[in-house]
Image: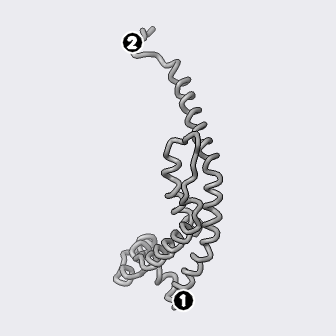
Amino acid sequence: MRALMVLTPLVMLAAPAAAAEPEKDFEIPAELTDPAMAETLGRMLGSVTKAMLDLPVGELQAAVEGRAPGAADKRRTIRDIAGRAPDLERKVERHVADAVPRMQASMRAMAASAPAMARALEQAAEQMESSIDRATANMPTPGYPKR
């Protein structure tokens, strides 16, 4: 779950690059190699995590347990389930801060492997096109006489 939260912003950054048609001279976006971007993503992740702590989940919990939600369920948040420890937010901030160096390393690795991924996607697309051409080559035309 933690890895998913850390990698989601990276995937969002990489999605436009993966969807774009690979160029012959593939250029790595500067955002993927900029350490400041990892810091920014870390701060964003911290804010999102804090907001998620206040997400109401009591009604969902009641539904999973197969019962009608009560008034207390309607007020129950993730923070309530995690515990109302006074240092909870500080722990979350520290955890996110600890994840930033790993995020920077992941971004560097992704940037280094992006050209190879683009070439592999291009080759896969070419193979799919040739497979479709071979598969449709022997299909009868609508006007072909039946026996």
Is 29 placed above or below 87 here? above
Q: Nearer the viewer, residue 67 or 9?
A: 9
Identify the residue shown where x is 51% and y is 86%.
Answer: 83
For mark 2, give the secondary structure.
Answer: loop
x then y, percent, for residue 99: 61, 72
Amino acid, disc 2: Gly
Tag 2 residue: 143
Separation (CA) of disc 1 from disc 2: 76 Å
The C terminus lies in quadrant: top left
Local crowd size for mark 1, using a 10 Å CA cut-off: few (<14), some (14–19), many (≥20): few
**Callout in the foreground (1, 2):** 1
Q: Is there a contact, CB below 8 Å, between mark 1 and mark 2?
A: no
Give me the disc on residue 141. Answer: none
Question: Quick one: which residue is furthest to the bottom in this view?
Answer: 86
Q: Quadrant of residue 131?
A: top right
For mark 1, give the secondary structure.
Answer: loop
x then y, percent, for residue 76: 41, 81
x then y, percent, for residue 50: 47, 78
Identify the residue shown where x is 52% and y is 69%.
Answer: 41
Identify the residue shown where x is 34% and y is 83%.
Answer: 71
Q: How is this picture coloured?
A: one colour
Is 86 placed above or below 78 here? below
Identify the residue shown where x is 54% and y is 42%.
Answer: 22
x then y, percent, for residue 4: 56, 64
The N terminus lies in quadrant: bottom right
Tag 1 residue: 87
Local crowd size for mark 2, using a 10 Å CA cut-off: few (<14), some (14–19), many (≥20): few
Q: Quadrant of residue 26?
A: top right
Q: Nearer the viewer, residue 93 or 56?
A: 93
Amino acid, disc 1: Asp
Q: Earlier in the sequence, mark 1 or mark 2?
A: 1
